[in-house]
Image (spheres, grey):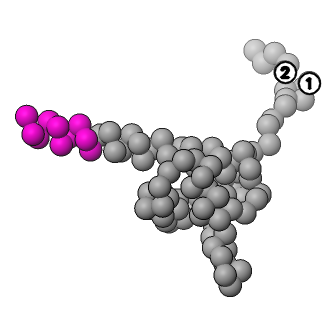
Amino acid sequence: MEVINVLFEDEESEEQEDSETMRLLRYLTEHSGKLFTQQQLMRAIGTNPHDMIHLLQELEEKGYLRKENDGKTDWYTLVEHFQQPPTYEPAPEDLRYIG
């Protein structure tokens, strides 16, 4: 019984972590090109400082985030090649029937 509870708690923490990761990436994508402090991001997605540090480190290691320091503050932004790509609208010649 204890093993099942421990496994369930692990799944729950993974789901929570995934949702926090997705909320952070979604927020950064919606505000792409802007710089944020750790505190601003923490308030935006509603998480605690310990989890936020872990999220930022993980996303930076995976190459999603870039951290810049101005000598006083760490600033975070979404790496450019992970920002929203432009949408493709087919030209009329792309719509012809190929048969």
Residue 74, horizontal then vertical, whole percent: 63, 73
Q: Quadrant of the N terminus?
A: top left
Q: Residue at x 14, y 36 (%)?
A: 4
Q: Amino acid at mark 2?
A: Leu
Q: Amino acid at mark 1?
A: Pro
Frontmost residue, 10 versus 89: 10
Say few, some or many: other residues with alpha carbon within 10 Å of mark 2 (under 14 / 14 to 19 / 20 or more): few
Disc 1, SS: helix
Magenta highlight on residue 46: no
Could you tell me residue 24's position as x and y percent?
Answer: 58, 49
Mostly what secondary structure, the magenta segment?
helix
Q: Farthest bottom residue?
A: 71
Q: Report the residue marked by disc 2.
A: 95
Q: Nearer the viewer, residue 76 or 84?
A: 76
Residue 56: give x, y in percent of width and height. Answer: 52, 62
Identity of the residue drawn at 66% across and 51% down: 28
- Marks 2 and 1, how far apart at CA: 5 Å
User: Farthest residue in the left direction?
Assistant: 1
Q: Which residues are magenta?
A: 1-10
Residue that mark 1 sits on: 92
In terms of image quadrants, where is residue 96? top right
Relative horizontal placement of residue 47, taking residue 71 as reference (left or right):
left
